[in-house]
Image (spheres, helix red, strand yellow):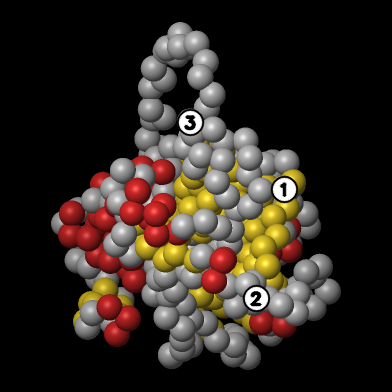
Amino acid sequence: MKKILFIIFFCVFYSLVFAQTQSNYFCDINNYSVGGNELTDNIGTVMLTLVDNSPVFMLALYKRGISDLNNRDNIYTLYFFDFRSSNAVREANGWSNGNVVIDLVNRPELRVELLQMLSFYIFRILDSSGNVQHFINVNVRPIEPAVTPTPTPAPVQPAPAAVSNELVRIQGGTFTMGSPANESGRRDNEGPQRQVTVSSFMMSRYEITQREYQEVMGTNPSSFTGDLNRPVERVSWFDAVEYCNRRSQREGLTPAYTISGSGNNRTVTWNRNTNGYRLPTEAEWEYACRAGTTTAYNTGANISNNTGWLSANSGGTTRPVGQLPANAWGLYDMHGNVWEWCWDWYGNYPAGAQSDPTGASSGSHRVIRGGSRLGSAADVRSAYRGNHIPTSPLTSIGFRVVRP
């Protein structure tokens, strides 16, 4: 499935009577649906504008959030919803290119519902039968607060110091890969358990940070910014592979990957005789995560808010790397924060012992491991397996690197 570049949703703001002039708000997308297909990944920031007591709702979906507000080239689509004269509002703002205007006067079959719960707004458009056609849930944060006395400038805080993401030597060995049938939260794709031997390798102590990615790639695609020590996210599998090659070249190493083709038709070949950076195999990842343990987590049979970033304690955002304790081999954030891309195509486990397995020979999805800030405790277990389309970035997926 191709990445959805333009999210078409219809929502309208009605019965707003408190705005005397134009007022702007930032809105963080929590979830939305298009044609009944629910999508739950946070894809950006929108701007809501209320104009002169009129029931007008405008949404602008930005590629990279707040920093792009003044750059209209970075707007995917701007939506205007107006009970009065949609054209007048559109022309008054001068934002005609790429706008979609829905005038409910000419769409009597549609009915609008607005629910407000604290800072959440839920906009729904229903058809004549009462079926919900589209909805969007947003968090609302003021851009322009009411006039207040000029505050005393706060002292400038220094930027967080860069973490030292050195490589940790992982001594090779044999371990039991997968989960036992009686493990709480287990899924069928985590078996059969089998003995797997992996050779020695080095792995980055932390997930690749936004600072590291920006230094190599010249851009930071992440949604959760403000601290460059947060893990980079919104990177596709191909982005992660390209990062590995570019970093290898910067450091005088031989790139591990040969990339041919372009766009969604790229193919990647791994030369295992090189010394450059690469993504871990799924077996290497689980071996490193377990760090000699056989329990559901490298912390034991359970995980707590002090040992992994998941939905219960993340606050819905990524966290700077290395804030929670490392596992026994000195690796941080192996449980939660962001999923981590692996080399392997996703497929069923074979039966029998293996040495240095590299996954299925082909497929449509690549393996992701570790769970994320959005997961439950069961979703961040050492054996839990995820998968995702290699061309599609998400705010819940990052990566870490390895070398021979």
Which circle marks residue 109 in the picture?
Answer: 2
Is 28 placed above or below 359 here? above
275 vs 323, nearest the viewer: 323
At label 1, the amino acid type is Gln
Going 33% across and 54% down the picture, which residue do you hit?
Answer: 91
In the rendered image, residue 309, in percent from the top left (x then y), is placed at 63, 48
Task: Report the residue marked by disc 3.
Answer: 144
At label 3, the amino acid type is Glu
In the rendered image, residue 123, in percent from the top left (x then y), is placed at 65, 58
Instruction: Please indicate whether residue 97 sits to the left or right of residue 361 in the image.
Output: left
- The answer to whether one can see residue 165 in this image is no
Q: CA distance from mark 2 to mark 1?
A: 23 Å
75 vs 4, nearest the viewer: 75
Instruction: Please indicate whether residue 333 sits to the left or right of residue 273 in the image.
Output: right
Indicate the secondary structure of the residue bearing disc 2: loop
Task: Report the residue marked by disc 1.
Answer: 116
**Within 10 Å of the Cα at label 2, are there few (<14), some (14-19), or many (20+) other Cα atoms?**
few
Q: CA distance from mark 1 to mark 3?
A: 20 Å
